[in-house]
Amino acid sequence: MSDEQKNGLFSQELLDKFRYFLHDHSSERMCRNLRKVFFDYMRQQHAGLDVHFDTILDDVEALMDFLDICSDETKDWKNKLQNTS
């Protein structure tokens, strides 16, 4: 059990959902697709962008960085899951 779980920062339900989500959805593919959608949108909306666009950029960049880390951390999950079955 991790320190976060001991401290109650994350519920077991959230941890389970997160685990299943990453197992069922390729974070590498999601990140790639989000980048495509985001930059396609940017090309179409380059004029008249929201006043808070800087925060939107920061949030999207943080999400993409998070998905990159998820992808790196979960690359061998299928092998690990097959070996534990």
Image: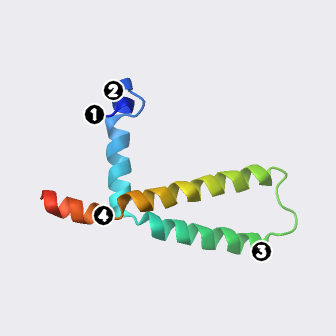
Query: Around disc 3, counting alpha carbons within 10 Å, would you say few (fewer than 14), some (14 to 19), or many (20 or more)?
Result: few
Mark 2, residue position: 6
The colour scheme used here is: rainbow
Looking at the rendered image, the disc whose residue lies closer to the viewer, 4 or 3, is 4
Residue 43: give x, y in percent of width and height: 77, 75
CA gap, disc 3 and disc 1:
47 Å
In the image: residue 79, left or right of residue 51: left
In the image: residue 46, left or right of residue 68: right
Give yes or no for contact between labels 2 and 1 (Cβ–Cβ under 8 Å).
yes
Sequence-wise first label, 1 or 4? 1
Mark 1, residue position: 1
Residue 28, compared with residue 51, is above or below; it is below
Q: Secondary structure at mark 2?
A: helix
Mark 3, residue position: 44
Sequence-wise first label, 2 or 3? 2
> In this orientation, which residue lies closer to the viewer: 22 or 75?
75
| Residue occupying image coordinates x 33% and y 34% | 2
